[in-house]
Image (cartoon, helix red, strand yellow):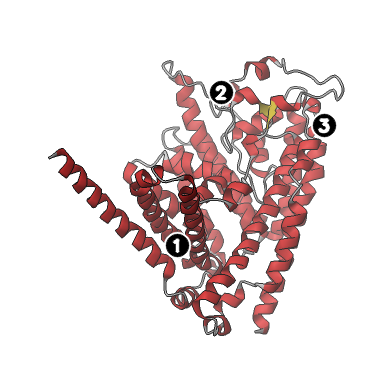
Amino acid sequence: PIENCVQVTHMALDDYIYIALIVVCIPLGAVAKHVNGYTNRLLYCGLVGFALALLAFQEQIWHSLLTVVGSYLIVKYSSIRYCHVMSLVFNFGYLAFFRMAGRFGFQEVSTGTPNAVQLILSLKLISVAFDLRDSTLHHHDPKDDSQAPPAFPAEALNFGFMDFFSYSYCFLGLFTGPFFRYRTFYDFLNQPDPEKMPTAKKAFQELTYVPLYIFVFLVLQKYFPVWYLASDEFLNHPGGVIYRLAYMYPCLIWFRWRFYIAWQLAVSGFTMAGMGAYPKDCECRAGMGPSKVSQKYKGNTLTVDSQTGCYVEEDIDFTTIKQLNVWCIETMTRATGAFVHWNMGVQFWMYHYISKKCPLRQYRRFAVFVVGAYWHGLHLGYYFAFFSMFICVLGQEAFVKVTQPLRGRSPTWLVYFWNFVDWNISWRIYEYQQTAFRLLQTDDILRGWASLYFVGHILSALFIILALIISRISKSSKGDKNN
């Protein structure tokens, strides 16, 4: 249909604008590396980022400004015991208003770049409140012997509005992530001898496979468009369910490789600026930053390469701003394997601020899926996708757990066979669930799943049933041996 073709054209155009804004951040990052001094870097990162946000939001910039000012007032003037909860409720509540602004008489906000900025911004603003609370308690607790540096060093606890503003609007990661904590930003502003950071070579290495991702994305998007999944031609194709399952494979490839392009470009910008660069003995984790205090970094005793005048590359680690591991995602044999290596900054945020903070331990994983669905949007398609994946993860993990003893005793060739089967089943279920993520509309989702005979849900249920049966048989056989 013509309206579908027009929609695809608009989506592609928005993608190109989005990518252009991310690409601009790479040379801006190179400039940031050579801006010395805390105040100069603070102003550069914040004002440049706000200018880019203004280009994206235009007259709708007041949405992001309101959330920044509101969040600042919460963390500065509310009780330290409750500021994290208030910030969470305020920012996630505002996300609902932001998406339904048209229903309240305001101009409808674009679901493209402005929405992406608001999503990343909400995570950063919420994290400040949680980290400020935890760091304040850390500094006031003499019994706390944790080796990890606090999210807020003692001298940064009394930050001002400009510090908060610049972290919120920092041009690095503004449009697509990766998520980074205030501590990472603070360390970047106070980086000793930033010009000695070996960044250029590493930044270009991040772009090595981007041309391949772009080529595959453009080709597959043209010949396997998403809108075709909701068409009558697709649902009634004579090839049947085999054709429909096969079509989703290339369709999902370009859908996720589009994110590969954006994230690799974004990480290159971070690397070029030296943001998230720490000595390896800090033992950094994606999103979190250092898990240990580095004495080398603290005393500025890092080894300098006499030829380049920069720190030795092997001593510097950029794991803090690592966003994905493409090889692990593409070769994953279980659904959880994709989650761990996909959008790693946001995965850390979900684990650290939602899962760990959830008071009901047995519902922590479920809480992550609920928050993840809400964060992505209000369309029912997001909830269909996340809740279906939740069932899939439970079923697959239960099945793998009860069959692990059998797999451990299998010969090598059979282990590889099991892995191949797991890989195929995981991706077919993942593609099935992602249909909801892409179509979003309830009628289109149910029609699409019905044309596939709800194979994803049936396989997930089959995993759970088989796991229960095998577990019961295993317990019975153990009981017989004991008798």
The correct choice, above or below, for 2 with respect to 392 in the image is below
Residue 311, quarter of picture? top right
Disc number lying in front (2 or 3): 2
Residue denoted by label 1: 383
Which of the two discs, 1 and 3, labels the residue nearer the N terminus? Answer: 3
Which of the two discs, 2 and 1, labels the residue nearer the N terminus? Answer: 2
Residue positioned 76% across, 44% down in the render:
48
Residue in front for this viewpoint, 191 or 470: 470
Q: Residues within 10 Å of mark 2 (few under 14, many from 20)?
A: some
Secondary structure of residue under mark 3: loop
Residue denoted by label 3: 34
Q: Residues within 10 Å of mark 3 (few under 14, many from 20)?
A: some
Which of the two discs, 2 and 3, labels the residue nearer the N terminus? Answer: 3
Query: Visible in this render: residue 54?
Result: yes
Mark 2–mark 3 Cα distance, whole angstroms, equals 27 Å
Mark 2–mark 1 Cα distance, whole angstroms, equals 38 Å
Residue 273, quarter of picture? top right
Mark 1–mark 3 Cα distance, whole angstroms, equals 45 Å
Q: Amino acid at mark 1?
A: Tyr
The correct choice, above or below, for 372 with respect to 249 in the image is above
Q: Amino acid at mark 2?
A: Lys
Secondary structure of residue under mark 2: loop
Residue 372 position within the rendered picture, expressed as x and y whole percent measured from the top left: 48, 53
The correct choice, above or below, for 100 with respect to 404 in the image is below
